Image (spheres, rainbow, N blue to C red):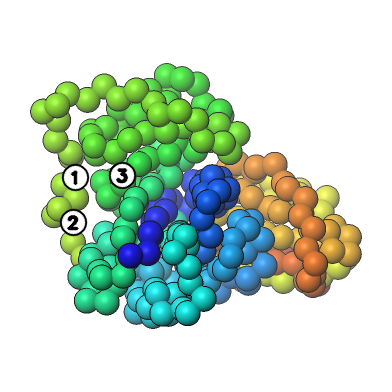
Amino acid sequence: MIPLIVLAGSLGAGKTTVLRELVENQRDARCHLIVNEIGEVPPSLGDFMVRSESAVVLRGGCACCIRREDLVEDLIAFANDRERQDKDVLFLELSGIADPAPVIHTIFGHPFLANHYDVQEVITVVDAYDSGATRRDGLWARQIALADRCILAKADLVPNEILDELSATIAEINPWASLVSSDHGHLGPARPRRVSEAARPVVDPTNLSAQPEHGALPTVTSIMVGDRFDWGSFGVWLSLLLHRWGHDVLRVKGLVPASPGEYVTIQAVHHVVFPPEHVTLEEHGEGHIVLITKNIDTERLRRSLDAFVQVN
């Protein structure tokens, strides 16, 4: 049986940061990745963030619905790989709007996958810094209901009383999930749980439908970036965009050139921009910026960016 760890969580919650630490903590195992992206995101945007033996990026839709058959094919292909070893562990990072219930149903109900994969853990990354808009979404509760462990990402950015309140909310949804904080991108010790033995979850995971319930898909805009990218002008544009339309900007991520072979990451969620990272890549080329939005006209977005900075 192949150990499989499933990672879920909302857009921008910090799944990739958590995934990087989970992989680094698997010191005696060879780690492989399947990463689900809802848009046609270029490989360079996600693959460099987590070092692994192999990585497959499932693009162009959610693994819980329109890309479910492709996920099954990828899982079968990995199980049949002759170079696979006994110490291999597979991580599946779902997209931010993926409902994990249909994915788990598919694995347990498939005659081949059920006999080749051991789903060891479902981990849901919860954005502690989220203002609360995401928490009103039913998908947020479904992602928590399926979790064996919930990780409070960005816990260092919020006061303890907010963490306590969020922990209590998670306990109401899923009393049995363990809870861990992630401070500055590093996993901490388990948080205490104040849950009675008679507690029952608000969302019963045994009754979750095999049909996805993530609602309408957001808009994914991918922009290629040339060598003459003006970082300063882009920073002004991004700040203005998030100030005015941050509630409709679900995710911004990018990898833009700073010098030959040197790149800078772009990470933003709603109204918040996170510190960039400097990355060195042996195979370098153009950079990319991906914006995941709702209720924003894509052409207006592109024209606005072009007015501030010549991206190509």
Q: How many marks?
A: 3
- Compared with 234, 211 (above or below) is below
Report the residue at 60% width, 34% height from top.
Answer: 184
Task: Tell me how far mark 2 sits from mark 3, CA to CA.
Answer: 15 Å
Q: Are marks 2 and 1 in contact (CB under 8 Å)?
A: yes
Residue 206 versus residue 236: which sits nearer the camera? 206
Mark 3 belongs to which amino acid? Asp
* Residue holding disc 2: 208
- The x and y percentages for residue 78 are 44, 75
- The x and y percentages for residue 49 are 64, 56
Mark closest to the chain's N terminus, 1 or 3: 3
Q: Which mark is residue 148?
A: 3
Report the residue at 42% width, 19% height from top.
Answer: 161
Report the residue at 33% width, 35% height from top.
Answer: 178
Mark 2 belongs to which amino acid? Leu
SS of the residue under disc 2: loop
SS of the residue under disc 1: loop
- The x and y percentages for residue 123 are 38, 48
Residue 123 versus residue 269: which sits nearer the camera? 123
- Compared with 162, 76 (above or below) is below
* Residue holding disc 1: 203
